[in-house]
Image (cartoon, rainbow, N blue to C red):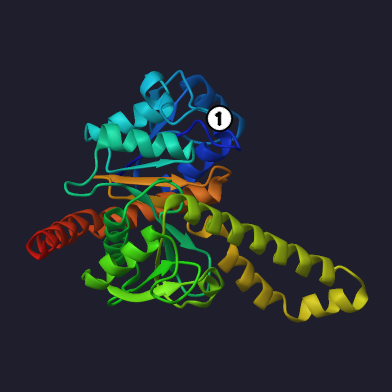
């Protein structure tokens, strides 16, 4: 398998991306294409004593920054992200990993790699770092959506959890401000009706307070709400971890208590560590595109590569295509 990696554009700079790519290439036994400023890439490798033997470098002189408009992907022809997406579109690799600008990646993937036939919007599907794996989509790609878009999100999320996490008939919940059927805006109310008629295991509305407790396996919402929910969970996780550290460092008793439950704390820390999943796939794109967190370090990049391998090997894309086509035909018959 060959993974294309956009080296530029992440918050931590190219060094962590290159280190993660080299580690992933070695541990996962994959071929790698690094896309970015070749002088910078080779300099980083030399400084960190990284062996680039067997790794292809494709030069890209420009960068799409986090502050750039999503449509900058069309203007910056030599940007590393655009060059990487074109390589994927041309069949030069099996998957792409980028920790760059989310909006630009979603726009570029739609323009150059294209959506799966019949899918109207691609969605960022984030696996929440909880005890029970829970997939949230859309977590940031689409601010404005329709009930049809969110119904397709439910189908795509169900397929992903079936294929990668071996869940039979994943439970799908619609994120809302109450569990009653008529809660929410007209969009939520109409989506609720569509999901009741969709061939997914729809369990109804779920509230924000339900998210950490495994009430469902797939949470469906629009990208604006989903991104706020995701960032709130990440912030709360950091807050809780910080409070624990403060308590255990507060004196001799605190230090002794920490020593007694260190293993359990380590397990909890790993569960809440976003780096363990590496990134989020853009479900609905015709080839594997993985959006890694903007502040990804080497470990997160390696795990994003691992996720890309699993995503490709489980044929998620072809199954999404079949399920969405079947749902579309069913809706046409109903109308």
Q: How many labels does the image show?
A: 1
Furthest residue in direction right, as rendered:
251
Where is residue 327? Give x, y as percent: 16, 62
Where is residue 93? Give x, y as percent: 28, 38
Q: Which of 196 and 7 is in front in this view?
A: 196
Q: Can residue 207 be seen in this view?
A: yes
Residue found 17% across the figure and 61% down from its top = 323
Q: In the figure, 282 relative to 263: above or below?
A: above
- Among the 4 quarters of the image, the one containing residue 294: top right
Residue found 54% across the figure and 51% down from its top = 299
Circle 1 SS class: loop
Q: In the figure, 52 relative to 314: above or below?
A: above
- Among the 4 quarters of the image, the one containing residue 324: bottom left
Q: Which of 257 and 2 is in front in this view?
A: 257
**Residue under circle 1?**
67
Where is residue 195? Give x, y as percent: 28, 68
Q: In the figure, 252 relative to 283: above or below?
A: below
Relative horizontal placement of residue 100, taking residue 282 as reference (left or right): right
Q: Which of 43 and 65 is in front in this view?
A: 65
């Amino acid at each position: 398998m060959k993974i294309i990696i956009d080296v530029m554009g992440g918050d931590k700079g190219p060094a962590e991306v290159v280190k993660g790519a080299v580690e992933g290439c070695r541990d996962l036994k994959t071929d790698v294409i690094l896309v970015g400023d070749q002088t910078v890439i080779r300099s980083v490798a030399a400084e960190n004593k990284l062996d680039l033997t067997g790794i292809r470098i494709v030069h890209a002189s420009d960068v799409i920054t986090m502050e750039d408009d999503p449509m900058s992907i069309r203007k910056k022809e030599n940007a590393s992200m655009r060059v990487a997406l074109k390589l994927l579109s041309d069949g030069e690799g099996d998957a792409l990993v980028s920790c760059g600008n989310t909006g630009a990646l979603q726009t570029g993937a739609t323009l150059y790699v294209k959506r799966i036939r019949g899918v109207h919007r691609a969605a960022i599907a984030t696996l929440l770092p909880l005890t029970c794996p829970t997939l949230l989509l859309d977590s940031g790609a689409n601010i404005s959506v329709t009930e049809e878009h969110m119904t397709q999100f439910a189908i795509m999320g169900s397929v992903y959890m079936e294929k990668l996490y071996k869940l039979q008939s994943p439970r799908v919940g619609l994120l809302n401000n109450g569990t009653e059927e008529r809660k929410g805006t007209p969009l939520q109310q109409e989506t609720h009706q569509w999901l009741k008629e969709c061939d997914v295991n729809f369990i109804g509305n779920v509230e924000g307070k339900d998210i950490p407790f495994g009430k469902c396996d797939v949470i469906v919402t629009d990208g604006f709400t989903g991104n706020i929910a995701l960032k709130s969970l990440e912030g709360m996780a950091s807050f809780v971890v910080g409070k624990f550290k403060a308590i255990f460092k507060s004196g001799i008793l605190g230090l002794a208590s920490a020593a007694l439950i260190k293993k359990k704390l380590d397990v909890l820390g790993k569960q809440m560590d976003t780096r363990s999943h590496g990134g989020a796939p853009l479900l609905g794109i015709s080839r594997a595109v993985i959006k890694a967190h903007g502040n990804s370090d080497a470990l997160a990049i390696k795990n994003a590569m691992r996720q890309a391998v699993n995503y490709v090997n489980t044929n998620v894309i072809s199954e999404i295509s079949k399920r969405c086509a079947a749902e579309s035909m069913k809706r046409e018959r109903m109308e």
